Amino acid sequence: MTEKLKKWNIGTAISVIITLAAITIKPEYDLKNHFLKYSYQNIFATLFVIAYVAFFYDRIMDFLSDRKNRIVCIIMGAFAAFAIVVGYSFDTTGSIDVVRGALIKNAIRFMALGYAFTTLFALVFIKINDLLASGAFMLNTERKLKGLYKSYIDILHKKPFITAVVTVFIILIPCLIAAYPAIFMGDTRVQLAQAFNSSSYNHYDVEYGATKLDNHHPLAHTMLMYICVKIGVAVTGSWNVGMFIYTLIQYVFMLVCIGYVVKTFVDEKFGDICSILFMLYVVFAGGHSGRYIFLATKDIIYSGFLILFTIGLYKALKEQKFGRFIYIGGIGMLAFRKEAFYILLLTIVLCMILALFSRKKLALLFAGVVVIHVMWNNVLVPAMGIHAGSTREVLSLPLQMTGRYVLNYPDEVTDEEREAIDAIVNYEKIAENYDPKHSSPIKNTFREDSTKADLMNYFKVFFKMFPKHPQIYLYALIEFKYELFYPKAFNKATYLYSYSANRMERANEFMGDVGADFHYPDNAALTKFRDSLCDAMVRWNGYPIINIFNSAATYVWWVIIAFALSIIKKNKGVFIITLPLIATILFCILGPQSGGHIRYMYPLQMALPCISAFSLKLIKDASR
């Protein structure tokens, strides 16, 4: 590495730290106080960025002189500017009023931000080029190590898998103790209630048969929790022990996935810093990873399978053959998330189009995914008398748009439109139930006895209403999902222990007929320890720089940069390993929760470090 390049890299590191600190610093630990609020910190950060960009002006202009680079950066810059200007308006007023009230001022702001972001994205790609040129992310055998660090790295090189597993396990022991028996959420109660055939359970307000199981939540996850609890109750008489068995299985599985990532890094000769940073990232990113890994939800195990699938895809691109990780990861993804079916098919189809692998093998893989999906959902689930789920689960976005329309323009809804809407949801409650950040209040009034014809009529009306007030549909979409792209240091889904305790109480009430008894141990010392750990995590969430990991937009823009890099470098491999995460973002847009619900970003959060490292290696190998 040249001395000039070293100075640039050191300067970049210092500048990034100072800028992020300035932008994210807050006078108090208020998770709702987003970090893009106009303040002296932002003025300082802006001036610093301007000075830094000026220092790199020649290199930036040289990079943007390439037409492809320029187009990619301009599109990204314009979209980022739109996200900031419009996102700020919806974040502060819940409408477009801030923009509309000062149109010229905001048009100027949009152009200024667009230019600034275009320049900054160019700078990001320049620094990625520097990283590729320096090879700093690869193993440096000439580097001299000393002391305990050298001893640890030697062990890491010899036994990377077990070293990573033991390291993360030891660090997270306090979180494991605090989480006993598990961290509950709303879905945990629902899944356990249906598995135990609780008399209180009627998720879809329908007549159930011999079982109340339904296919809304992945059955593999529901039955895993059920079996663990049954074992715990049968062996020890304790519902807590049963739930803790589930927690341990999930925890060990995630440790195995983390271990395989580190093993892959070592096997592929990535720098030691990649393995160290990944382990630290898993434990400390945003302060919530230490809790999420013990959260009883399908998203955690699904994330582990996505990591394995990513490793398998990377190895397949390198070796031109499908290994066990492709199959294990893909089948696990299908078992723990419904949208995995579409993500896998999209990935396989684009691999065919890009001719990355043998089309015969891809065709067999495609057929295998379809057969597994159809046999499970269309044959086995009905044969077992399990309710298939509800059509309402795919109606989140259109119902949000309809809800906002009815709320804002009730007098313009015709009798025909009202009847078509009322045929699938309760029209009388649609306006009062409208929540701009959550579709479930409207969606939960869905009429399960509605027919396909009713649904077709609704969509005819849905598209017929659009030309009358098209902005209403757009505003509903933006306010529902703007947090996916608008950076704000607020994690909607914190899942604190106090919240979990409340969910346990509700689960016990809901499942009282089957004797459910979930609770945190009634021990003063343990309660104090749990509260202190939770307080430390919340404080950690609020620290400058760290709090960017509490924003869903951090991960979305990380994916966008990786995707753009595949276009700039014309690297099909990078495009393909990024594709599952792009598809995940699209499903988040269609999903029932607001963009700020970061639990849905957990698969991205866990897979992105792997994809980033693998992308750099694929690009570097392609340049040889």
Image: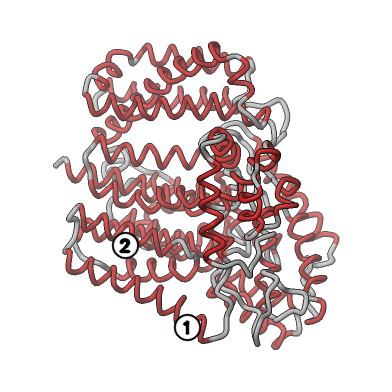
- The residue identified by callout 1 is 380
Q: Amino acid at mark 2?
A: Gly
Q: Nearer the viewer, mark 2 or mark 1?
A: 1
Which residue lies most toward the front here? Answer: 415
**Residue at left offset 37%, top offset 20%:** 119
- Which secondary structure lies at badge 1? helix
**Label 2 to label 1, Cα distance in Å?**
28 Å
Looking at the rendering, which quadrant does residue 25 occupy?
Answer: top right
Image spot of residue 55 (x, y percent): 36, 13
- The residue identified by callout 2 is 312
Looking at the rendering, which quadrant does residue 184 occupy?
Answer: bottom right
Q: Are marks 2 and 1 in contact (CB under 8 Å)?
A: no
Q: Amino acid at mark 1?
A: Leu
Local packing at callout 2 (Cα closer than 10 Å; few below 14, some 14-19, many 20+) is: many
- Check the image and report above or below for 43 versus 76: above
- Check the image and report above or below for 36 versus 167: above
Image spot of residue 382 (x, y percent): 52, 82
Local packing at callout 1 (Cα closer than 10 Å; few below 14, some 14-19, many 20+) is: few
Image spot of residue 404 (x, y percent): 65, 41
Which residue lies most toward the left here? Answer: 624
**Is residue 148 visible from the viewing direction of this image?**
no
